[in-house]
Amino acid sequence: MIDFHEWQQRDLQAIGRQKQRLQRLVLLRTVSFLAMVFAFAAGFDGHVLGTICGVLLLAAFLLLVRRHQKASFAKLLTESHLGCVQAFLDRKSGKWRDFSDHGHDLMREDRPQEADLPIFGRASLYQYLSAARTKAGRERLAALLSPFPDAADAIRLRQQAVRELSGKPQELLDLEAMSHLLPLGTDLSDFCTMLEQASIKKSKALRLLSFLLPVLSFVTLALAIAGRLDTTIPGLLFSLQLLLSFLLLRRSQALLAPLMALPQELSVYEQLLARLEDADYRSPLLLAIQKDLREQRASDSLHRLAKLADLAAMRRNVFFFLVANTACLWDLHCTARLFAWKEANGRSLRRHLTAWAEVEALLSLATPALTRQAVCWPELCTGGPELTGKAVTPLLIEEAKAVPNDASFTAGTCIITGSNMSGKTTYMRTLATSAILAYAGAPVCAEHFALTPMAVYTSIHVSDDLSRGISTFYAEILRIRQMVEASQEERPLLLCIDEIFKGTNSADRITGAAEAIKRLTRPSCITLVTTHDFELCDLQSPNDLPIKNFHFEESYPDDKIHFDFKIRPGRCHTTNARYLLKMAGILS
């Protein structure tokens, strides 16, 4: 098991050393700058040695500035690494519920499973797992956490990739730390669209003019300095360049403004893709991603674009804008380079960013392997519906507090009874969320877990909808009807129904529940139903498939209620509602 506390201490020590290095560089930079000023002052007074020293000190100053920038970035990266390490520690301690990205915005109204289990929202699978920073990465992870499984081969490919990443924790954390330099929700899709479109055409005449006019201006300036030409001519030419820049300002701004906003993001993407290109991967999915990036020279193209973004961003300084455009038509050169990059790589950028989004999702799915001791890699079965597990625990409960349970289900129905708070719903959710983790390619919290890829349907948190005039009971009817319709397609299903038809009176509830259970007891379905209605325990199967009973129970040592949260075969024979009412002071 990885010792994240040790990594935390190493990062803290590294940050301390980096702070000291930055302080030294700041001191040296200040001293060199002051010395340079005095040296040039001496040179101005006629001391040639002063001018020479001034030039050397200027070179030293620029070198120190560059080193300070690199050291600042190294410290920023270490701080990001420390933040990622802390996030893993928070997952182990339960503080992950405070993570800002809980994925509520990714929920789909047409998938009630996403709130029932829960997959998205506060205290959800997504909140626990996500290491994604980009909009595309978040959406890709959300797509993988689906109750509807992909083809088994696709799941196995992802599982192999996630398993490889989880086996390289240092590389995984380095990638996450680098990606966390991106703002949460980073989205370059509009920029990609701009590059893919041809809304503004390049002009060969302007391209030629951007080189000829500055050359002509500097040649006339040299002649004027030599006394062979009137100084008015270079002055007019330089003024013409500034005027031309202002006339083309709207065109330049339309092209360069989106680029100017992205120098940091593009630089981070460049380094991330370079890490992927240089990595030593073995799993087919990661090798395919790596091969595509290498063939497209993705990091090199991002490097050129990031440098261009830095150059374009210098336009924000008004003084630089005026001087650079007066001297060399800066905007025209930047737009010309952007057009050249666009022609060579414009349609590849979205593909590169999509590749990183896939890796972000895979990194997220590797999280349980680094935070839990008891995890396994699920096996995918073929044929009829099957779900088996040994010592399965819920990912969203701290490992020390989670109670393991076994599972062994095939086609048929399981009626689960038990007292309030005994663990019925948690058990059902644990199996369903473990299935969704398995479909995504992630490890599952269990000693062993195997299942047939089955679509997961749920009826757990059912509520009314006043805007459409739908009561809680009718909303549950709609959920059950959806299950019945899906079961008629004869594809493998995992159906989870909590407190079936709880929104109506007992007589109608038992009658409706019995009929629904019979309809859902089919060769393609594993149906799990929790209930307090013991009458449902006596249901007879409408076919050769079994309707089995399981239960959770409680005990009362020293007149205090105790739950062991262990599932047992057979029906429950106890209730605890009166005890809980007495505890609340409602009954005497």
Image (cartoon, rainbow, N blue to C red):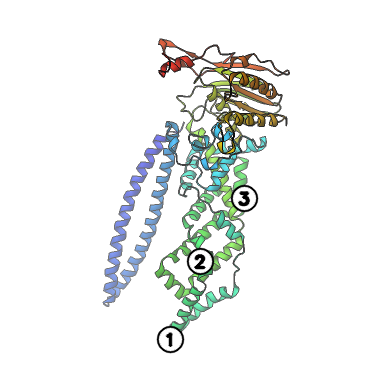
Q: Which residue is drawn at 62% across and 57% down?
A: 347
Q: Which residue is drawn at 52% across and 57% down?
A: 303
Name the amino acid, label 1.
Thr
Question: Residue 69: x, y in percent?
Answer: 39, 56
Vertical comparison of 198 with 289: above or below: below
Q: Is residue 375 left or right of residue 72?
A: right
Comparing 104 with 355, the one in front is 104
Question: Residue 124: x, y in percent?
Answer: 51, 34
Vertical comparison of 66 with 114: above or below: below
Name the amino acid, label 2.
Gln
Q: Are marks 3 and 1 in contact (CB under 8 Å)?
A: no
Question: Residue 572: x, y in percent?
Answer: 56, 13
Label 2, label 3: how many angstroms apart (C-alpha)?
Answer: 33 Å
Label 3, label 1: how many angstroms apart (C-alpha)?
Answer: 56 Å
Question: For mark 2, what is the residue?
Answer: 253
Instruction: Say which label, 3 or 1, has the lower sequence index.
Output: 1
Tag 1's secondary structure? helix
Tag 3's secondary structure? helix
Question: Residue 129: x, y in percent?
Answer: 51, 37
Instruction: Say which label, 2 or 3, has the lower sequence index.
Output: 2
Mark 2 crowd level (few <14, some 14–19, many ≥20, 10 Å Cα): some
Question: For mark 1, what is the residue?
Answer: 232
Name the amino acid, label 3.
Asp
Instruction: Say which label, 2 or 1, has the lower sequence index.
Output: 1
Tag shown at residue 292: 3
Comparing 373 with 136, the one in front is 136
